[in-house]
Image (cartoon, rainbow, N blue to C red):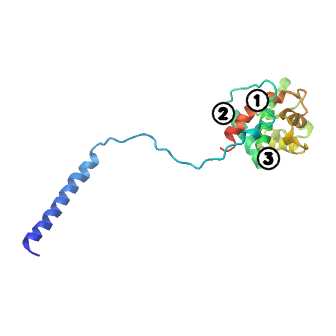
Amino acid sequence: MNTIMRKSVLGLAGLAFAGGVVGGPIAAHQTQSVDARPVAVLQADTPAVNKAKLIPHGVQGEQSHIDLNDEQIANAKAIIAATKKSGLDERAAVIAIATSLQESKLENLGHLGDANDHDSLGLFQQRPSSGWGTPEQITDPEYSTMAFLKGLKQIDGWQDMPLTEAAQTVQVSAYPDAYAQWEQQAADLVAQYWNS
């Protein structure tokens, strides 16, 4: 290799080394402005709930609404999960949640002493003395929902009934029309949590 060529190669190597030292560790300690805006993450769309299926007859009468705490929301989600597990659709979940809103305000009630309706317990105020299960079973949200849905499945044409009629046929309440007032809130909960 001739001398001029060798000096050129060594000179370029030296510049590259010096540039690496200057641009490397020193540059690593320099602060740079970074755009800290969140990056959108694309997710596959979850199928929307068919809202016409949730309230096929339209709501009946004046609707009630309560603000729910974390425990009540967890109970609504448990009802939805049990409905899916039983193989029933969103309409069944609306009926079950509306029933629970009427019976217990989505609270898993234990024995309430003199304030209790006989021996009614749990989300649906089911009674051990009426064959719904043991107190431990009835106060298990999955079990009590499955018991309610089993009763619902035994009603011919429950899918086409107004909510209050379907709920009353299972529950046999002294206030048969009271379930209707919770249909909109129940449908909203199902729409919100069915695909979550």
Q: CA distance from mark 1 to mark 3?
A: 22 Å
Instruction: Give x and y (percent) for residue 1.
Output: 11, 76
Instruction: Give x and y (percent) for residue 68.
Output: 69, 29
- Give neighbour class at mark 1: few <14, some 14-19, many 20+ (Cα, 10 Å): many
1 or 3: tag closer to the N-terminus = 3
| Position of 104 relative to 152 (above/below) | above
1 or 2: tag closer to the N-terminus = 2
| Position of 45 relative to 174 (above/below) | below
Q: Nearer the viewer, residue 55 or 96?
A: 55
Judge whether residue 140 can be spotted in this image: no
Determine which quarter of the picture holds residue 190: top right
Identify residue for label 2: 70
Identify residue for label 3: 88
Depth-wise, is mark 1 or mark 3 nearer the camera? 3
Identify residue for label 1: 105
Which residue corresponds to the image point at 83% horizontal and 43% vertical from the top-left?
149
Q: Nearer the viewer, residue 25 or 157?
A: 157
Which residue corresponds to the image point at 46% horizontal and 41% vertical from the top-left?
38
Residue type indicated by callout 3 = Leu
Q: CA distance from mark 3 to mark 2?
A: 25 Å
Determine which quarter of the picture holds residue 161: top right
Residue type indicated by callout 1 = Lys
Residue type indicated by callout 2 = Asp
Which residue corresponds to the image point at 71% horizontal and 40% vertical from the top-left?
77
Q: Is residue 60 left or right of residue 172?
A: left
Which residue corresponds to the image point at 27% horizontal and 46% vertical from the top-left?
29
3 or 2: tag closer to the N-terminus = 2
Judge whether residue 166 can be spotted in this image: yes
Q: Is residue 118 left or right of residue 68?
A: right
